[in-house]
Amino acid sequence: MNLTNTLHSKENNMSDVTRRGFLKTTSAVAAATAVSSLATPVPASAAGSNERIRIGFIGPGGRGFGAHVKTLCNLHKEGAKVDLVAAADVYSVNLEKALAHIKKTTGTEAKGYVDYTEMLEKENLDAVCIGTPDHWHATQTIHAMEAGCHVYCEKPMTHSVEEGLEVVAAWKKTGKVMQVGVQSTSLPLWDQVRGLLQGGKLGKVMMYQTEYFRNSAQGQWRYYKLEEAMNPKNIDWTRWLGVKEGLAPERPFDRAVYRQWRRFWDFGSGMYTDLFVHRTTAMLKATGLRFPGRVVGAGGIFMEYDGRDVPDVATVAADFPEGVQGLVSSTMCNQNTRIQQLIRGHFGSFVFGNGEGFDTFQFIPERPQVTRNSKLKEETIRTETIGNTTEAHFKNWIAAMQAGDPQKCNNPPDLGAAAIAVVNLGAQSYRYGKVFQFDEKTGKISDGDGSWSQRWEKKSHARAKPNHIAGWKAGDYGSLLEGPDYMWLPVPWSEENPPGGSPGAGAE
């Protein structure tokens, strides 16, 4: 990775621990394997439809309680063959709340731990759910898989691109089933859209555009309430930070940092990883795109001056080797004038509503002057709806564990790592004023240079055919330009051989 000059400049105040999190050694990236080999993992041993799955929770507070604990308790009551047997949390109030809820709803006396590694050692678990802050995700996920556990990890999958590759490597090596908690990937919509795109409905796919606009009178993430019980007597602060593991630097206890950690770079990346990763993952699933080739981010803290690190307005533009651009944009200061979510092709676009409650989407064809087909008309395409995507996402994870099929998950680690590459490089671009390039064959990150634009200029000068998304089945449909007669005039000009001749003499 060629980021040393940026990360060690006097202008940035990045801690050594955070720098280590972003600037992994070449050997660590190599150990995570090249991106081109992110293929099928070792098959997991099937839990079997009649075997019960012993599940433990790591970080059952916030989303870890409201989504993980509550959802699995409900599924247990409905007859799912899962037993919720243990939980680990550094905050005693969260731990007691989770254990009490499990007891009340399932009748199980689940065991409580402060140290999740002790839970992994003692409880003979089949699976864990991880709901801790972002900076812990990779460490806990890899520990769990190496301990023989399947994993459900809340989004984002990791805190850095390199960690994402390391998780994928562990997933492939262990053969464990892993679901990343972007619940919208369990919507049938995205598989439906991908099939239509691969079949050529839009012609050559050119761009996706998405958003996550949100507003708050308090400022983003400050609506997470601070409570008197949040104090060093009830919270193992050093363990929460991950000082021993090198995940964050030691710092004085701070309730706001503990509860509203998404506002600070050491622990999260604000809207990039809390919000952008939702929409980006969905768009990658819909298009079949994975790792970007080039990423740039922009934005700033334009209003929310409350001591935060992360911006309140941001945009990420990602260019992909398939010849597609992805755009995600947001402001945390207005949500009533959102941009449209859509996918654009040469012969038309798919336009979606905002949010995740889709029952239809629109096909908007390009003009007949371009498509040469006056029969293409606007149409409303129906899609299957899901009332509770979080529940559907957990059911999908359980089904994958029962089948022993890591590929059965709707949001597996290779998709999770690709989404992290887009949003995290966008965040780092914003922070350090850099354009970043990603080599999909080696998994290496470098400073942007002219090679990206030169790649496309070379294709143009060679009159090559465009690249396509994975699974493309439509041949040249909607992918080639017409050659007007006047473009057959030979070039360049010379006095000895002026332009002229017949069509074909100077073909493009």
Image (tube, rainbow, N blue to C red):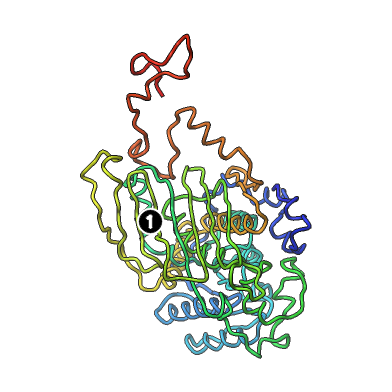
Farthest residue in the left direction? 375
Farthest residue in the top direction? 496
Q: Which of 165 and 501 is in front in this view?
A: 501
Question: Residue 92: image x %, image y %?
Answer: 65, 86
For the point 59% across and 67% down, the residue is: 302
Question: Residue 406: image x %, image y %?
Answer: 50, 58
Question: Residue 154: image x %, image y %?
Answer: 54, 69
For the point 36% across and 18% down, the residue is: 504
Check disc 1 and give the amino acid type: Asp
Tell me: 221 left or right of 499.
right
Q: Mark 1 points at which residue?
A: 191
Circle 1 SS class: helix
In this rendering, the answer to whether 508 lies above or below 423 is: above
Q: Nearer the viewer, residue 343 or 99?
A: 343
Tell me: 10 left or right of 261.
right
Tell me: 198 left or right of 321.
left
Quarter of the image where the C terminus is located: top left
Q: Can residue 81 be seen in this view?
A: yes
Count the marks. Answer: 1
Mark 1: few, some, or many residues within 10 Å (few <14, many ≥20)? Answer: some
Question: Residue 42: image x %, image y %?
Answer: 55, 53
Q: Which of 218 and 382 is in front in this view?
A: 218
